[in-house]
């Protein structure tokens, strides 16, 4: 069963989160959902309201180490120096100085220029800027190991126009994009001679930040990669300029949270900060389900509860039924989060239907459990409310909130989100307020994820909408305000819970999990310390 998109007609979690668009004063993330009420909304069932506001935090666990493609993708997004401050506390810097070649250039004329670098048997990222006075003159860029060519990129002129192409092992060429005369292009090529999970060695080619060729098979398999060549054809009257040439190790950190000791430490961190439950993005598949399994096997799991966030990855048909049986069995356990007394809490961020919600309720009733409290999400209050009515859910919420402009201050998120709590309550009747800790998916723009539909273009424009990092105190104040709002709006917050985005969405800019740099340079989990203080005084 596909981990990413079991049913192309229903968006998976990655589809839900692929756009950071300006909606109702801030970039909203969630379901597009129905907006027309077509069924009666499920009324909030009677039960005792929790005496204090429950604080949940979303978990998305792709930090599975470089031996899996998910872990590899996370590592490569976190490897650039400007993003390393996001690394979870259990990360290792495996290559302290990943730069192999930096800032070489050549100007004009006909030339063959070769740059040697330390031989690598792992993935490398090659970057350069170039332009041709007359495009299509067949200048070439070659990456080799010894005398073996692994990548051959060139321009050409054909009847259809001038093109950037790369050679394939069959001798054919693959078109990357069209090119124009006297125009600068910024190139980036990621070459992986030994990808995880025994995948075929490949190269991805990016032009001006857009991936134009995905997983092109390499031409050869040398022991190491060690030379970058630029060539022009002396017989053709075109000048080629090349600048800003660099070669780096692509994956220079390793974030692997798949050990029991690490999970036990995460539980302790969360419990000490006053987090009541984790809302796991629920993947029945491995390796993304590994963190949940480690939590469930921990001797410390009594310190923090959990609940499920469902999307298309939960499966369809027989897969859905089998996964639901496992989930309902877990709902009976004491550490599964309940609200309003005995009602198991379930979030659905994609794939919600009336049939699925009914199945969840029916299976829980057959197991002698309280009626599940089902929360659906939407981009807008209206879409969330419409979906709630359509599927028979109990409340509405959001997954996250982002800014409406690039580089906006964190306060722009908190101001927009604070207003959205009331909007969602007014439209949906019952709400679980979201507390976003940031939104900055630029690492996914610089290194598009190797999962999901390919080539993955879902984050290509998200760098237009990102926020500055909030301080620990700003994040804590936002959470404290959400708790206060929830307490003072009890008629529309029956579940008496708030949901933090996120425990570990480090790649998208929302996290409170301690980072390596926090503990290394401050000796304390600064965001969690601020949260703990805010919750003590809430």
Image (cartoon, rainbow, N blue to C red):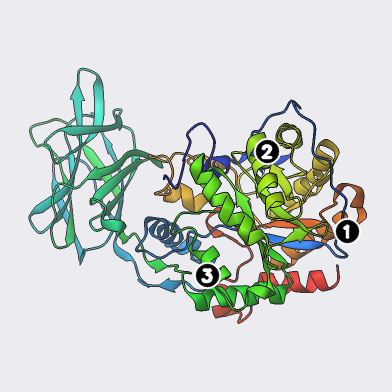
Image quadrant assignment for residue 212: top left
Residue 490: percent from the left, percent from the top?
90, 52
Task: Tell me if 261 is positioned left or right of 465 in this view.
Answer: left
Residue 496: percent from the left, percent from the top?
83, 57
Rate crowding at label 2 as few (under 14), some (14 to 19) or many (20 or more) other CA atoms within 10 Å.
Answer: many
Rate crowding at label 1 as few (under 14), some (14 to 19) or many (20 or more) other CA atoms within 10 Å.
Answer: few
Give the label, 1 or 3, closer to the camera. 1
Mark 1 secondary-structure assignment: loop
Q: In this rendering, does residue 190 appear at all?
A: yes
284 relative to 133, above or below: below
Sequence order check: which comes first, mark 1 or mark 3?
Answer: 1
Task: Tell me if 99 is positioned left or right of 106 in this view.
Answer: right
Rate crowding at label 3 as few (under 14), some (14 to 19) or many (20 or more) other CA atoms within 10 Å.
Answer: some
Mark 2 secondary-structure assignment: loop
Image quarter hosting the N terminus: top left
Residue 456: percent from the left, percent from the top?
42, 41
Give the spatial CA distance, label 1 vs label 3: 31 Å
Give the spatial CA distance, label 1 vs label 2: 30 Å
Q: Is 211 in front, or is 359?
A: 359
Residue placed at 72% from the left, 50% from the top? 365
Q: Name the residue under label 3.
A: 294
Give the spatial CA distance, label 2 vs label 3: 32 Å
Q: Mark 1 points at which residue?
A: 48
Mark 3 secondary-structure assignment: helix
Residue placed at 75% from the left, 60% from the top? 338
Q: Mark 2 points at which residue?
A: 379
* Residue 437 image label: none
Residue, far top: 159
Q: Are marks 2 and 3 in contact (CB under 8 Å)?
A: no
Task: Tell me if 528 is positioned left or right of 52 in this view.
Answer: left
Sequence order check: which comes first, mark 2 or mark 3?
Answer: 3
């Amino acid at each position: 069963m596909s981990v990413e998109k079991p049913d192309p007609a229903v968006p998976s979690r990655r589809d839900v989160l692929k756009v950071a668009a300006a909606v109702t004063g801030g970039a909203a993330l969630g379901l597009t959902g129905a907006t027309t009420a077509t069924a009666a909304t499920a009324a909030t069932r009677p039960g005792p309201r929790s005496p204090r506001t429950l604080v949940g935090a979303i978990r998305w666990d792709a930090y599975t180490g470089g031996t899996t493609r998910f872990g590899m993708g996370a590592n490569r997004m976190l490897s650039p120096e400007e993003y390393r401050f996001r690394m979870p506390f259990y990360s290792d810097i495996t290559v302290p100085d990943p730069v192999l070649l930096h800032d070489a250039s050549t100007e004009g004329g006909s030339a063959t220029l070769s740059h040697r670098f330390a031989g690598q048997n792992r993935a490398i990222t090659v970057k350069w800027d170039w332009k041709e006075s007359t495009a299509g003159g067949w200048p070439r860029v070659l990456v080799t190991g010894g005398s073996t060519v692994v990548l051959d990129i060139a321009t050409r002129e054909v009847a259809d126009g001038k093109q950037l192409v790369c050679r394939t092992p069959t001798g054919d060429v693959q078109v990357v994009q069209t090119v124009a005369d006297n125009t600068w292009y910024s190139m980036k090529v990621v070459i992986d001679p030994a990808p995880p999970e025994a995948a075929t060695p490949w190269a991805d080619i990016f032009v001006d930040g857009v991936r134009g060729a995905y997983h092109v098979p390499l031409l050869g398999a040398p022991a190491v990669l060690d030379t970058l060549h630029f060539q022009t054809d002396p017989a053709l009257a075109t000048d080629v300029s090349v600048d800003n040439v660099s070669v780096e190790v692509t994956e220079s950190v390793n974030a692997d949270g798949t050990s029991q000791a690490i999970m036990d430490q995460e539980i302790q961190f969360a419990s000490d900060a006053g987090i009541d439950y984790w809302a796991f993005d629920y993947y029945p598949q491995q390796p993304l389900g590994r963190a949940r399994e480690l939590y469930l096997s921990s001797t410390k799991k009594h310190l923090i509860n959990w609940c499920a966030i469902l999307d298309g990855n939960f499966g369809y048909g027989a897969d859905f039924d089998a996964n639901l049986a496992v989930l309902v069995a877990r709902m009976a356990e004491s550490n599964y989060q309940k609200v309003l007394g005995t009602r198991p809490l379930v979030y659905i961020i994609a794939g919600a239907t009336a049939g699925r919600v009914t199945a969840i309720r029916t299976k829980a009733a057959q197991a002698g459990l309280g009626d599940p409290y089902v929360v659906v999400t939407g981009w807008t209050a209206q879409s969330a409310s419409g979906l709630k009515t359509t599927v028979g859910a109990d409340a509405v919420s959001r997954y996250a909130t982002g800014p409406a402009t690039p580089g906006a201050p964190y306060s722009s998120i908190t101001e927009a989100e604070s207003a959205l709590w009331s909007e969602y309550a007014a439209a949906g009747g019952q709400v679980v307020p979201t507390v976003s800790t940031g939104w900055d998916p630029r690492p996914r723009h610089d290194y598009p994820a190797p999962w999901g539909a390919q080539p993955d273009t879902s984050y290509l424009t998200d760098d237009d909408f990102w926020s500055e990092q909030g301080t620990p105190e700003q994040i804590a104040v936002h959470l404290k305000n959400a708790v206060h709002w929830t307490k003072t709006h009890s008629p529309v917050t029956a579940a008496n819970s708030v949901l933090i985005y996120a425990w570990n969405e480090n790649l998208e800019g929302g996290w409170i999990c301690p980072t390596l740099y926090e503990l290394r340079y401050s000796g304390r989990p600064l965001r969690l310390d601020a949260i703990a203080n805010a919750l003590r005084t809430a």
